[in-house]
Image: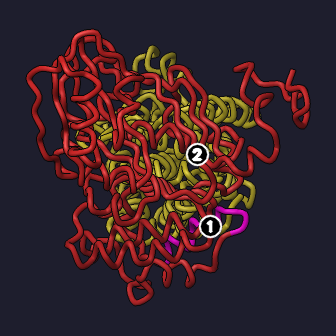
Amino acid sequence: MNLGYLALELRRVLREPGTLLFIIGFPGAFYLLEAVIFESQWPARSAIDPGAVLLPAMAGWGVLISGMLVGARVMNEREAGWQRQLRLTPLTGGGYLLGKAAVGLLVSIPPPIVVALAAALFRDVRLDLGGWLFVTLVITLGGTPFAVLGLLIGQFGNKKNTQQIIIIGMLVLAIFGGIFIPLDSLPPWFTYVGYATPSYWLIDLGRAGIEMGGDPMRAGLILLAWTVVLAGAVIWRYRHDSARN
Amino acid sequence: MTGGRENLGQVKNPEGMDETLLSKAERRDTAVHVQGLRKHYGEVHAVKEVDLTIKAGEVVALLGPNGAGKSTMVDMIVGLTTPDSGIVRVFGLPPRQAVLEGVIGAMLQEGALLDDATVIEMVGMVASLHKNPLPVREALRKAGIEELARRRSTKLSTGQKQRVRFAVALVADPDLLLLDEPTAGMDVRRRHEFWHSMQEFTASGRTVMFATHYLEEAEEFADRVVFLRDGRIVADGSVAQVRSLAAGRTLRATISGVSEPAMRALPSVVNVEIRQDKVAVLSSDSDTTLRALLSRFPHARDVEVVGVGLDEAFLALTSRTRTSEGELS
């Protein structure tokens, strides 16, 4: 990977304090709010605390939005014609993808940590070390397809529609991933649709940390498959996108 | 297949030609080789059947009105656009490979800059992508923007932005520099400064091809001028020829049974166009040409002599409507 490229990409993201603050603060705040709402309706005999159930969901939400929002920024440089300039350098489609995805991943590291801290400090959630790792670093890694998906949307979208596509995309993925409302409390077809989304498996991966998920290996492999397919599309698009504006 | 030439026949090439036809020396000496190039966007034929060879060290101006296909041509030479058919080679390499080798530097019309980065960051990043880049400071100095290094691109004037893009193209230390309307939006003084920094680059024997609207630029800075109209090369010649084109006069006459070789044989003739019996002869010395024409074709009718400036010559070459394939009216 080209370090000069990665360094500038990262520096550029850090120059957008508004987006960063939203990405880092929003999922943590949302976690606390949802925990309060769900607590009042939680069955008293339930073995597991709502604060713990919401933890992987909101950590996953943080990973999902940071990956997608950061990825979609590529639309700006495409519209400006910078991507055409990049195509005149030896930067390959793969190198381009790696740089962009790496930045998306780096930015996805803090949000789940903030959610985990909120859970530990304000909701008294206690997990073992492996559990904490799952709801933070593992879920960040599992978020790779969302960074790539954001990139892909930014590569196809324009100034007018990218924002809408990203917002609708994030909401649809959140609903079928069981992020805002646990899928158990929705009709079963939501779960069936969820199987077809990467967000379902992202939350499933995180839930392994609170011992509620499926096989984390299966979730990881499905997310990897999503990454490979989306990455292929991004590289193809980078090579063929020479559209004049 | 290539007889006495250096044998490159073993090179497998899906297009099945070209590599086998160019010797190694020719590759080094031929900066751009374009053959049978075509590109259309939907119904619009942007480039139709263009052949062009540019020798290493030449400074070539690509002139033509808007929509003549200049940008499409530049895009195909740098490999941003894939031609429908035809061959492009840059120093013997397909465009993408030439880019990977750092052979091509290009300043595109729409190659804008990043809003959230400084000049030195952008030039530095592009340098880090290339194999053998110039030192970043040197590229900035050559483009005349050292003092702008720490400035964000949002705080640059149009002319300054152009020079930043020039630095981005230069930092690859390319052998071929392609510039698409490099001085668009610059005032006269800035244009002169820009071409002054360009001369430093061409003095080292590098090849430059630039598309422009400004005739003076072509005249002043190019060795060779290629006129493009409607996706075709309608004229291609040295600056001296262009000058004589500008200094010359056009003779028109109606001569029955006229042939092009006969007209070209007349003294001081630069260019000949014939449509049925109507002849238009571009002459660098119209008196001599006219005398010879009248003595050789005493039956010539409707003779007229009109002066052409470079602007008119340019307009004449580039803006006439075509009545049928390849014919001028």
User: On the picture, is B5 further left or further right than A72?
Assistant: right
Can you see residue A139? no
Q: Quadrant of the C terminus of chain A?
A: top left
Residue B242: image tag: none
Rendered image coloring scheme: by chain
Was residue B70 drawn as part of the magenta stretch in this picture?
A: no
Q: Chain of mark 2?
A: A
| Chain that the image shows in red | B
Instruction: Indicate the amino acid at tag 1.
Output: Gly
| Amino acid type of the residue that numbered disc 2 sits on in the rendered structure | Gly
Q: Secondary structure at mark 2?
A: loop
Left/right placement of residue B25 relative to residue B193 reads right
Q: Residues within 10 Å of mark 1 (few under 14, many from 20)?
A: some
Given residues B258 and A126, the one toward you in this image is B258
Considering only vertical position in the picture, is B207 above or below B50?
below
Query: Residue visible at 57% across and 28% down?
Result: B35
Q: Look at the picture and state if A102 lies above or below B117.
A: above
Where is residue B134 drawn, in percent x and y?
64, 75
From the top left corner, tell me how far across and down residue A92 is, in percent. Answer: 65, 47
Q: According to the image, label 2 marks what residue? A: A143
- Residue stretch rendered in magenta on the structure: B120-132
- Was residue B123 drawn as part of the magenta stretch in this picture? yes
Q: Position of residue B237 (x, y in %)?
A: 43, 45
User: For residue A161, which quarter of the picture?
Assistant: top left
- Check disc 1 and report its element: helix, strand or loop: loop
Give how far across and how far down residue B52 sits, in percent: 53, 36
- Evaluate if marks 1 and 2 touch, with contact meaning CB atoms under 8 Å apart: no
Quadrant of the image containing the N terminus of chain A: bottom right
Q: Nearer the viewer, residue A140 or B41?
A: B41
Q: Is residue B231 visible?
A: yes
Residue topped by disc 1? B205
